Structures are given as structure tokens and as C-alpha cells.
Image (cartoon, grey):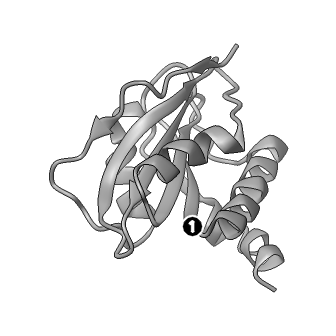
């Protein structure tokens, strides 16, 4: 069962600039070793400085489903220009499921419609590995921006 969490954003004081997947991972490290899946949203300005990040959903040991509209709700409220999402896989595998890629496809299409830049969806694991869906599945972005 997935639990909606978004009421308590974690504010990032140092305002790091996201230049790639490693920067996204550095913002979400605290959830890396969790025993259940979490979906983290990172909101950024036009120069990809982190405005804030927050846990949007908490799932089970092997699933964390979400709704696209809820991902973008806070981005609209906070006047963000760009965003990325991160979720963890407790079992050390960073391979995306079909649900992960479908959700990413929906997030990319929504960003295009709403005028946001969707930078990436990154999967992290307790063994300090990660996978960028943008790097691994660039065709997802190409489908939208043809």
C-alpha cells in the first residue's frame, strides 16, 4: 500500500545545482537504504538550482505507485521550472520495472504539457548504485520531443 506523504517538504539550504544523475542522487541519499520504496521529488529553478525536495510517497518493500498530477502539484505551487524524481529499490537492483518506465513516460508528457523541464527519473539502491532512466532510456524523452 502506498502512503501519500507530501505535507512536509524537506528544504535544501545549500541550493546545489543539478548537472546530472549524480547530483540528483546526492539530494536523495537519505532514502537510499530504506527498507521500503519512497518516491522523492526534487524541484529546481531555471538554472537547475534545487529549490526543495520532498518525499511524495512511501510504498512497500517492492512497490511505490504515484499519480502524475500529485508530482506536479507542488511544482506549480512553488513556481518551479524543472524537476526530477528519485525512487529507491530496497533489493539492490536498480533495473526499472515496466511500471517505472510507464510512469516516467507519463511524467515526461505532463512536463511538456505543463511547461516544465523534466530532467530525469533516477532509481537508487542501498549498495550505492543508481540508474538514470534518461541515460538508459533516452527514447522516452525522444517520443515526446519529436
Instruction: Residue at 48%, 28% (x, y): give it.
Output: 6
Left or right: residue 19 compared with residue 93: left
Asked if residue 129 can be seen in this view, the reply is no
Instruction: Residue at 69%, 70% (x, y): give it.
Output: 112
Say which quadrant the N terminus sits in.
top right
Q: What percent of the width, then of the height, locates residue 30?
A: 33, 34
Q: What percent of the width, then of the height, locates residue 128?
A: 42, 45
Instruction: Residue at 77%, 68% (x, y): give it.
Output: 140
Instruction: Residue at 72%, 59% (x, y): give it.
Output: 110
Residue 70: quarter of image: top right
Q: Which residue lies furthest to the top in this view?
A: 1
Q: How crowded is mark 1: few (under 14 residues within 10 Å), some or many (20 or more)?
A: many
SS class, disc 1 = loop
Figure disc tally: 1
Say which quadrant the C terminus sits in.
bottom right
- Looking at the image, which is closer to me, 143 or 91? 143
Residue 23: quarter of image: bottom left
Q: Which residue lies furthest to the bottom in this view?
A: 146
Mark 1 — residue? 116
Image: 111 above or below 25: below
Residue 49: quarter of image: bottom left
Q: Residue furthest left?
A: 14
- Looking at the image, which is closer to me, 32 or 140? 140
Q: What percent of the width, then of the height, locates residue 111?
A: 65, 63
Asked if residue 24 can be seen in this view, the reply is yes
- Looking at the image, which is closer to me, 121 or 125? 121
Left or right: residue 140 compared with residue 86: right
Amino acid at each position: 500500500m502506498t502512503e501519500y506523504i507530501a505535507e512536509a517538504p524537506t528544504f535544501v539550504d545549500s541550493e546545489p545545482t543539478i548537472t546530472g544523475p549524480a547530483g540528483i542522487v546526492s539530494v536523495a541519499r537519505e532514502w537510499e537504504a530504506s527498507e521500503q520504496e519512497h518516491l522523492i521529488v526534487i524541484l529546481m529553478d531555471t538554472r537547475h538550482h534545487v529549490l526543495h525536495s520532498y518525499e511524495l510517497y512511501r510504498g512497500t518493500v517492492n512497490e511505490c505507485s504515484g499519480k502524475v498530477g500529485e508530482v506536479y502539484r507542488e511544482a506549480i505551487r512553488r513556481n518551479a521550472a524543472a524537476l526530477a524524481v528519485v525512487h529507491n529499490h530496497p533489493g539492490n537492483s536498480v533495473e526499472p520495472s515496466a511500471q517505472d518506465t510507464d510512469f516516467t513516460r507519463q511524467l515526461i508528457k505532463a512536463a511538456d504539457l505543463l511547461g516544465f523541464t523534466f530532467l530525469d527519473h533516477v532509481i537508487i539502491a542501498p549498495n550505492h548504485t543508481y540508474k538514470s532512466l534518461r541515460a538508459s532510456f533516452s527514447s522516452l524523452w525522444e517520443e515526446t520531443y519529436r
